[in-house]
Image: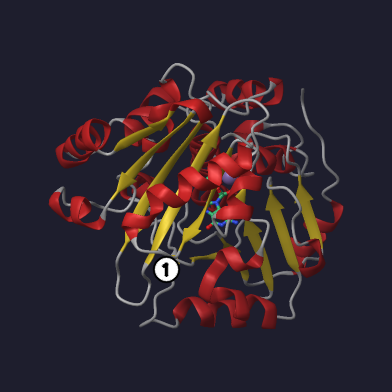
Amino acid sequence: MEKRFDTTLLEEMLSASMRPLLIGHFNPDGDSVGSLAGMYHYLRERGMTPSAVLPSPYPDYLAFLIGEDTPVTIHSHEDNSARELISSADLLICFDFNRLSRTEQLEEDILASKVPKVLIDHHPFPEVEYFDLVYSEIEVSSSCELLFWVLMSMSDVEGDVSSLGLKCAESLYVGMMTDTNNFYNSVSASTFEMASLLTDAGVDKTRLQECVYNNYSVDRMRLMGHLLKDCLYVIEDCGVAYLLLSDADKRLYNFAIGDSEGFVNLPLSIKGIRISALFSELDKGQDKYIRVSLRSKGDLDVNRFASLYCNGGGHLNAAGGRLYMPFEKVGPYIEKSFREFLKIG
Ligand code: 5GP
Ligand code: MN
């Protein structure tokens, strides 16, 4: 149950660092933001002054984790601050991605940096060659769970959860909770042990659930209703169901970043459906593409589907990617791809 890690090198790297920088992935989710914020607060508790960058904005429902006391620099085309932080840092710690390309425009800056680099991640086949120290476990629920057990192994913590500080504890709990879809996927005994240790140490799980899951707009609820009624397609003989979320519908329902969180899971509750997908049209001038989210049950490998058909990757049962085609072509393309992938029809 309890996991132990060798933290000797990590502790040496942290002691030698004056300007550590924490880095999450593009389209940051709860796990990436939670691990970044968790590490941020852990280091602050120890008198260090870390910085943190994200390659793109985080969703509203995570804003409560990143208050004034957790400054995070968000990269944009107009602002070079995130890139400058990378070039001036003396230690880089990356969270919740296996490929540097998941940092999009920051990839080149990370590659150009010659300082020690640490990766804490739970995706298959991480690019270990770019890092000096890698904590990688694909069996673990989330990067937040992995970071939790790494921190518990640190010599200044030695299994004492209260020494993490409440903000660190809450951040790690949120990342684990969101990546497991509120304890639905990928949980093991160590995940429940983590939850138990964190709640014992004062984490208010009900408050965190309220902040994340019961804080959406009316528009988002109506958009969900519209999608389920008018934009849900079922390929019965493949056990596949998918949702098409157009840019026009997003505008109609005042879509905000993070509003589609959870939508992809909804079709999985249909009897006989074992793979679900959400295709979300992004129409921002040059950045025009269709964002893909995939979920599956059992041994159906959507990571493989994402890399074969959707320019992406992820985990066995949760993956994502991008399509570059007119939105109206997505339906036919995806039906054909699933038939080929599942060798049906
Ligand atoms: P989500 O559907 O929640 O956006 O993403 C599910 C998982 O798929 C993420 O945890 C991440 O591992 C992976 N993922 C999402 N988008 C991409 C992408 O564009 N490329 C790759 N390689 N993986 C992605
Ligand atoms: Mn994750």
Q: How is the image coloured?
A: secondary structure
Q: Secondary structure at mark 1?
A: strand
Quick check: 103 above or below 179?
A: below
Q: Is mark 1 within 8 Å of ligand 1?
A: no
Number of marks drawn: 1
In-image side of 263 versus 21 (left or right): left
Quick check: 74 above or below 139?
A: below
Figure quarter occupied by ligand 2: top right
In-image side of 334 versus 97 (left or right): left
Which residue in the rendered view is the most extreme toward the top?
271
The C terminus lies in which quarter of the figure?
A: top right
Where on the picture, by quarter, is residue 80? bottom left
Q: How far across and down, in percent of the image, does residue 286 sit?
A: 35, 77
Q: How far across and down, in percent of the image, does residue 163 sit?
A: 63, 38
The N terminus lies in which quarter of the figure?
A: top right
In-image side of 38 versus 98 (left or right): left
Residue sitting at x 60%, y 35%: 317
Front residue (pair 242, 22):
242
Q: How far across and down, in percent of the image, does residue 37 sit?
A: 51, 51
Label 1 packing within 10 angstroms: few (<14), some (14-19), many (20+):
some
Front residue (pair 344, 61):
344
Front residue (pair 169, 299):
299
In-image side of 151 versus 244 (left or right): right
Q: Amino acid at mark 1?
A: Ile
Residue sitting at x 31%, y 35%: 232
Residue 45 in view here: no
Disc 1 target residue = 74
Residue sitting at x 72%, y 37%: 149
Front residue (pair 211, 302):
302
Residue 55 in view here: yes
Quick check: 111 above or below 289?
A: below
Q: How far across and down, in percent of the image, does residue 300 sit?
A: 64, 32
